[in-house]
Amino acid sequence: MFQAATRTNKMRGAVSLLELIYFSIVRSLRQSHRNAVIGLLINMMQAVIMVGAFFVMFQLLGLRGAALRGDFLLYIMSGIFVYLTHIKAVNAVMNSEGPASPMMQHAPMNTFVAICASSISSLYIQLLSLFIILTIYHITFTPVYILDPISAMGMFLLAWFSGCAVGMVFLGLKPWAPGLVSIISTIYIRVNMIASGKMFVANTLPSSKLVLFDWNPLFHIIDQLRGYVFLHYNPHFSSWEYALKVAIILLLIGFMGEFYTRRHVSASWTAGR
């Protein structure tokens, strides 16, 4: 009755939406750990432990000679960071708050804002961890040289974007079959431990083995990234355009699924969970 009427135009609406997304990102970052520094350190330690584990495995199995000419640790990190960025984006979008979440009872909040907040907060943490680890490695051990850093960063962002697209598909299916989607997402993550190609490069694979990994967009992204990172590697059997096209198709399918789910949402879906 006593509410003041406010005139809304497109500019003010866009600013309000960006402000809402910003505060949702901050809230999403705080959900992982109340202390932002500790949350960042935990994420960095995950990456460092994976790099160390793969380094030891390569040394014990004698596979170091099969790597590219150049910095061996940078070769390992180029695969680990992209893999982690992709997987974290999948989990972040898939586990973002759905239409039955109590947060959706607040008028400005909607599922689009929740998805944007979860995905961008995941990217922020991964980018910050990447820069800090590379800076420490550059200062402490050996200078880091990247052949084409802008294109390499483009592949890094493409890995995040494709992860968001896969997560959108899981998000649209999750309310209908949460148990099945959880199993499928776990299988997808475990399969990508090998199928992502972070332990080898496409140019060294015979054609009979290449077809086992060629379906995976993340395999193409990592292989293309190494072409932009290392001077002596030119990828011939991968394409970032393929990964981008698959990601756009999956994103459209995911948005259609999420829209359909939102229209048929029921508060009882979240009861007892």
Image (cartoon, helix red, strand yellow):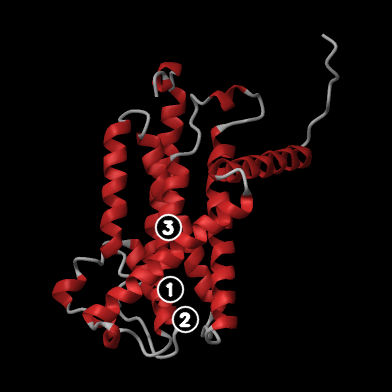
Which residue corresponds to mark 3? 86
Label 3, residues with CA under 10 Å away: few <14, some 14-19, many ≥20: many
Q: Would you say residue 221 is visible in this rendering? A: no
Q: Is residue 46 above or below residue 223?
A: above
Do the residues under discs 1 and 2 have CB atoms within 8 angstroms? yes
The quarter of the picture where the N terminus appears is top right
The quarter of the picture where the C terminus appears is top left
Residue at mark 1 to residue at mark 2: CA–CA distance? 8 Å
Mark 1 or 2 closer to N-term? 1
Q: Is residue 18 left or right of residue 7?
A: left
Q: Give the SS element for disc 1.
A: helix
Please state the horizontal and vertical placement of residue 228, each as a whole percent of the image: 46, 80
Most extreme residue toward the top is 1
Question: Label 2 is placed on what type of residue?
Answer: Val
Q: Nearer the viewer, residue 50 or 214?
A: 50
- The image quadrant that residue 171 belongs to is top left
- The image quadrant that residue 203 belongs to is bottom left
Could you tell me which residue is drawn at 37 percent across and 29 percent down?
175
Could you tell me which residue is drawn at 52 percent across and 84 percent down?
141
Q: Would you say residue 17 is visible in this rendering? A: yes
Label 2, residues with CA under 10 Å away: few <14, some 14-19, many ≥20: many
Question: Label 1 is placed on what type of residue?
Answer: Ser
Please state the horizontal and vertical placement of residue 262, each as a whole percent of the image: 46, 27
Residue at mark 3 to residue at mark 1: CA–CA distance? 13 Å
Please state the horizontal and vertical placement of residue 148, each as a whole percent of the image: 53, 82
Could you tell me which residue is drawn at 59 percent across and 62 percent down?
128
Do the residues under discs 2 and 3 have CB atoms within 8 angstroms? no
Which residue corresponds to mark 2? 229
Q: Give the SS element for disc 2.
A: helix
Q: Nearer the viewer, residue 120 or 84?
A: 84
Mark 2 or 3 closer to N-term? 3
Which residue corresponds to mark 1? 78
